[in-house]
Image: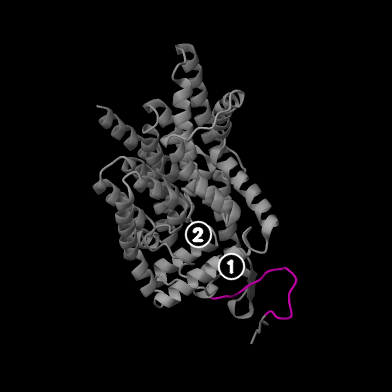
Amino acid sequence: MTAGRDRAIAVALAAFVIATRLPFVTHLLWEWDSVLYARAIEQGFHVSAVIGDQRPHPPGYLFYVALSAALRTLLADSNTALVAVAVIGSAGAVVLVYLAGRRFAGVETATFAALAFAVDPLVWAHGEIALPYIVLAAGSCGLALVFWDARRGTDRRAIAASVGFGLAAGFRQDLLLLLGPLWLWSMAGGGPRRVATGAIAVAAACLVWLIPSAAMSGGGEAYAGAVLSQSGSITGASALGAAGGAALWYDLRFTLLALGWGLFATGPVLLGLLLAPALHWLRRPALRWPGEPATFFLLWLGPGLAVYLLWIIGDWGYVLSLLPGLYVLCAALLERALGSARRAALSVWRAAAVALIAGTALFFVASGTRWSASLLASHDASVGGRVAYIRANFAPATTVLLAREDYQLARYYLPDYRAWLYDPAPASSADPRKRTG
């Protein structure tokens, strides 16, 4: 009965997410990386360190591109296919938040966490645009769920989880880095032999996307060189490189701001749920080894936070790897806090939960701020308007387009114009000169 009810709720959640995404989908590519995915769909997958030749950028996300390309055969254009993947990924991520929440909480609190996650402005917006970060959220939550089950499961379940880990990296290779410690913990429950077997399974599954990625990118050496070049440039500008403290301060502010948007009204609820036991502990501090649930959440969330603070937080969407875990943690803590609540207190909480979810959804739909429906519509209008204006007023043969963030959009939507990547920072005498011919 419980399993049947969970399935019914999961289906209802997926239907809710799809129904709320479809009216607000974007119709033009969102930004630089969106163009690279579209080019990979249309011209063929080819990872390169050369900006003009990236289809897409390293490390490539082969399965994400392949799924989008498959949908492209059924849909109008590459943007529609990429957005369709985002809509499907949104539904999957919300369902997985519910199912993961059910491991630690009852139906009511798990449903609250899933709905609060679904209507969050940052999450909602990323389900409407041609970027893969909502797929990252689904991958993070799905893997965390199977790792939790594998911790005390059989060897067969552990191998299945490891194979799933390697295959999921074909959609987002950063999952290997972000969830590697959690995978290791889940395998360690079965001893060294299970760890070794699981590692072989992960490596074998990774070959399924690694070999074709390298083959379509000029061979293993060229592919590895592109990935290392990309990683090296990131490291050089990170807190681990020459930028040091300045980069750390920027990453800290960016990460906190992105998490603020990603938690939105649920943020104060989660903060209160975390502060209450912390204050209680301060009254009688005692060092204890964290139990399995606490270790699970620490290993789910800690590595991602470390990566984003010390290495790279290049986009708002990066924190979508963390948000499912934070919402599931909220469900777990809520279940504990409401366990002894009386009927009147439960009624107040239910009313507050409904208001929180409805208010957050209304904010996305009606506000004109960042990560709102209005922002999505204005983006389409802006890109479309600029393309139309240039075509109406400037001849391709006598026009050069200068662009920085929108350089790839200019190349994609105005392919008959010359486009130069232009950074208005002071030029150096060592910079290559542009020649008009």
Magenta run includes residue 427: yes
Q: Quadrant of the N terminus?
A: top left
- The tag on residue 29 is 2
Q: Quadrant of residue 233?
A: bottom right
Q: Is residue 90 left or right of residue 149?
A: right
Specify start and end residues of the magenta stretch as a single range. Answer: 416-431
Q: Is residue 14 left or right of residue 154?
A: right
Q: Tell me the kind of residue under disc 2.
A: Leu
Q: Quadrant of residue 154?
A: top left
Q: Residue at x 50, y 31 (%)?
A: 357
Q: Residue at x 41, y 31 (%)?
A: 110
- The tag on residue 233 is 1
Q: Position of residue 54 (x, y in %)?
A: 49, 71
In the displayed structure, 239 sits above or below 370; it is below
In the displayed structure, 242 sits above or below 220; it is above
Q: Position of residue 165 (x, y in %)?
A: 36, 53
Q: Secondary structure at mark 1?
A: helix
Q: Quadrant of the C terminus?
A: bottom right
State whether residue 237 appears in this view: yes
Query: Which of these two is toward me, 207 or 356?
Result: 207
